[in-house]
Amino acid sequence: MAQVIVPASVEGPVLVCTEGLSVWGGVDPETGVIIDALHPQHGASLAGHVVMMPTSRGSCTGSGVLLGLAFAGTAPRALIFREGEDILTLGALVAGRLFGHDIAVLRLEAAEYDALAHENTAEITASHLKAGALELPLHAVAGALALSPEDRAFLDGAHGSAARLAMEVITTMARAQGAPRLMDVTRVHIDGCIFASPAFLTFARAMAGRGGRVRVPTTMNAISVDHANWRRQGVAERYGAAAAALADAYVEMGAKPSFTCAPYLLADRPAQGEDIAWAESNAVIYANSVLGARTVKHADFMDLCIALTGRTAQAGVYLPAHRAPRRIVDVVMPEGADDAFWPMLGWLLGQAAPDRIPLLRGLETAQPTEDDLKALCAAFGTTSAAPMLHIAGHTPEADLPPAPGADHVTLTSADFARLWGIFNRGAGTVELIALGSPHFSGAECAAFARLVEGATPAPGLSTIVTLGRATLSEISQNGVRATLEAAGVRIIPDLCWCSISEPVFPPQTKVLMTNSGKYAHYAPGLSQRAVRFGSLADCARTLRTGLAPAAPPKWITA
C-alpha cells in the first residue's frame, strides 16, 4: 500500500538513488548536486526531481540541509522511500509546515517501489501517484496515537507557541512511525546547531522568537566556528557571525554550550537502559551500542522539538524488540592489526548492513578501547542507516537473540584491502593531518602527544586536532596540550571536521591525511581534497615526513 507521509501536489523527473544517501555531507547545500564521491549517483542533482531511495543514511543534519535546499530552490519535489525514514521526512515536514515549501514524502511497498523505479517522470496529487501506466492510490498513515493530558496541553498552547509547534511536529512524525504513544526522555543532544545553511539559523531564531525554552537537560553538538576565536582565525564576518548566532540561539533557549559531537565523552553520560533523545549520528550509534542507552536517530529540528517538550514517540529502538540484530556479520581480526582496523571495520560493517542492526562476531578475544569503539561507530554511521550495532563479547546487548530470519555475511581480508584503496586515493605528499572526527578524547590526545613528542613538523604541513571544550580543559591542565603544540599541532575547540571551513581549514591543502573512517568517507565531498588514511602512528610519522605511507600495513597485505 502506497502511503503519503507529507502531502504535496508535485511532479517531476524520477531520480533513483540505488543506495541510501546522507544529504548532509553527500549533497551540495546550495545546488542539490550529490557530492558524495563514493555514492553510485555521484554528480546527479536532486533539484526538481522525484527522488527515490531505499532510505536515507548518515548524518542527522540532513533534515536541515533539505530545508536549506528548499530555501535555495534546489530541493527535490518529492522523496519516495521503500523503508521507514525520519530525517528527510522531518525536513520536508518543517519546510512545508513552517515555511510553505512543499516537498511530498511517500513510502511504497517493495513491488510498487520497483515498478516506479522504471518510470521517467511521476506526478503526485492529493490522492494518487501517477507515472506512465502506473497509477497508485495514496493512503494516509493509519493508526491511533494516544496522547496524555499534558501532551494535549502542549497542543492547546498551554506552554507557548514554540512548544505547541514542537508538539505538532512530534505527533505528526509519531503517527508516521506507527507509535502508539509518546514517552518521556531524560536528556537531549542538539545536532541542529551546525551552520550547514542559513535555514538552520532561520529555524532556530523562529523557535527562540516564539519563546522556546528547553524542559530537559540539553547538550549541543559541535558548531561551525570556534566560538571565541573565529574572528582572530580569519573567518569571514558574514559566515562567522551567522554560525555564532545559530549557537547563541540554542543557548538562549537553555541548551548547554558543550559544543561537541562526542557527548558521550562528557562526565555525565547516559546509563544503560536510559531513554534519551540524541541527534548526531555517531553519538546515537555509540549511545545505543556501547552505553546501552536508548535513542532513535533523531533528525535536526526534531531534537529541539523534543527538548522543548521532554516527549518523543515510543517507537524504533526505544522498544526492546526493535534492538535485536537482523544480520550476523562474521570477521576475523588480522594478526598485528593496529587502530586503523576499527574505523575500517565500522565502514565495512555499515556497508554489509546498510538498513538493519548487525551483530558482529569473531572479535570476542579482542580488546578494543572506548576510542576504538568510537571510531567504529562513527564510520558505521556513514554507510548504514541503522541506529546501533552489537559486538559479541563487548557491547551490553550483544546477547539479544537475533530476529527471526536474520541472515549472515562474512567480511574478509579482501574487503579491507579494497577499502584501503578507496581511503587512499590521494597523492603521497600530505599538506594537512586532520584529527578529531568525532572529537578527540583526552586519551587520544595523550596518545598522539606521546607519538609526536619532540618532533619537528615537515615543511608546509599543518596538523589540526578538533575537540570539545571539556577535553581542551583536561589536556590544558595535564600538560598534553603543551606537548602537542610544541610539535606544531593546532588545537581547535567547538567545531569539527564535518563543519570546518576555510581559512581554518588550510586553503593550500591538496591532500589531507586522517585516522577517521568517517572523515575519510566525507572529506572528498566536503573539502574537495584528496585523502589519505592510516593509523594514529601513521599520522605521527607523516607529521615528521610530510609523506603518507607508501603501502598498506602488513596486517592488510599478509
Image (spheres, rainbow, N blue to C red):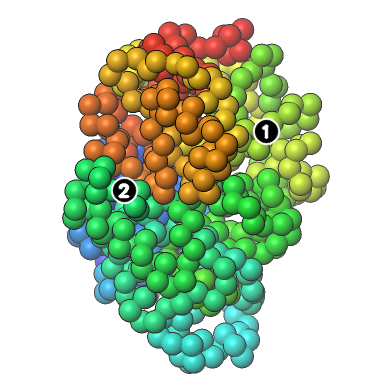
Which residue has dot 1 on it?
369
| Residue 299 location (% of width, % of height) | 47, 60
Q: Which of 503 and 159 lies nearest the eye of the viewer?
A: 503
Element at label 1: loop
Give the camera-side residue of 480 and 203: 480
Which amino acid lies under the numbered mark 1 shown in the image of this protein?
Thr
Residue 298 sits above or below residue 410 on the image: below
SS class of the residue under badge 2?
loop
Residue at 76% of width from left, 48% of height from top? 397
Task: Give the mark, 1 or 2, whose residue is nearer the N terminus.
Answer: 2
Residue 380 in the image: above or below residue 423: below
Task: Residue at 26%, 42% (x, y): give it.
Answer: 233
Report the quarter where the C terminus lies. Answer: top right
Residue identified by numbered label 2: 229
The 10 Å Cα crowd at callout 2, few under 14, some 14 to 19, many 20 or more, is few
Looking at the picture, which amino acid does disc 2 mark? Asn
* Residues under numbered marks 1 and 2 in contact, where contact means CB atoms less than 8 Å apart: no
